[in-house]
Image (cartoon, rainbow, N blue to C red):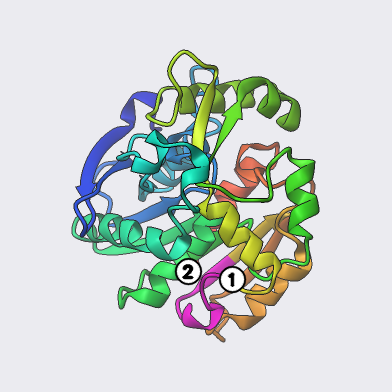
Amino acid sequence: MTDPSDLQRHDVTADDGTRLRVYEVAPEEPTEAVLCLHGGLTPARALFAPPVGDGTSHSWLHAVADGGRAAYALDVRGYGESEMLPEYDEPADQSDPPVRAWDAAQDVKAAYDFVSDRHDTTHLLGVSWGTMTGGSFLEQYDDRPASFVQCAPVYKSPVDFEAAAAALGLETDLVAYIVEEYDVVKERQGGGDVFEAVWAAIAETNQALEDENAYVAQTGALADTKDCCAGNPPYDAEAIDVPTLVVRGSEDRTSQREDALALYDELDVADDRTEYAELRGGDHFVMHSHRRHDLYAATNAFYDRI
């Protein structure tokens, strides 16, 4: 079994020179790997390997490694330990949302090249906005991973973006970035040990604001989600021609069932290696919920079938 100290860090460079952080947890001599892509507000380590207690029971990276594959997770530019954005040094209303999924695809490309150079087979996994950055990568580049897991996807959502953003306390007139404050996020997410671990992981990164219990997050992911709610996703599902698992929690109010099924139906893979699955009782952060081990097992089993 892997343990928390197994988390390694690597720096890779995008084509435009931006420095990116890639995390790794790996068993001995793996031939396959999984590259994980985070969502719009939470960086890679906080989402995929939050330090809950002293163990790894909430770490998807460690679950992948325990299944025999090397697990990697990318911090897109502006997130986590990757290079921050110049927009963060200016007032938020001076710029539009800076990193859209189509832009982030170059970061996915850099990480994918790094991982695929080290392993014979590479799978791709995206959560929420990560399904958009991964989908944009597949549409822009010729690389074809062995499979693509789309967890909690938002594609052509029936959700009213204005109402959903307001319910989360987010501005709908999107400027370059938002500031997420501890008390506000805790109330929104309900607190608890997992929340505290996720927050602690973000507080250790470049996103954290000095002398404030808050962090900054660029709004490109929110702008992409707004487009999805208007029926204009940042990528075309028909461009995804690799075996795909679309998976969501049944109680996820952000990733809607009808939207996830529509995405599944549009995928350009007709064979039985493309699947749709729901985990009853899971929400948008099903990877941290009581159904997390079922999610980890389902994705590992999907890789085994592929």
Q: Position of residue 210 (x, y in %)?
A: 43, 18
Where on the picture, by quarter, is residue 119? bottom left
Q: Secondary structure at mark 2?
A: helix
- Is 12 drawn above or below residue 104 in the view shown? above
| Residue 182 lies within the magenta run | no
Q: Secondary structure at mark 1?
A: loop
Q: Position of residue 59 (x, y in %)?
A: 50, 35
Residue type marked 2: Gly
Determine whether label 2 and label 1 are within 8 Å by CB: yes
What secondary structure is the stretch in magenta mostly built from?
Answer: loop
- Locate residue 293 relative to residue 31 in the image: left or right: right
Instruction: Give the labeled residue for mark 2.
Output: 135
Instruction: Give the labeled residue for mark 1.
Output: 233
Q: Residue at x 34, y 41 (%)?
A: 86
Mark 2 packing: few (<14 Cα in 10 Å), some, or many (20+)?
many
Q: Residue furthest top?
A: 211
Stretch in magenta: 233-245
Quick one: 236 or 173, which is closer to the camera? 173
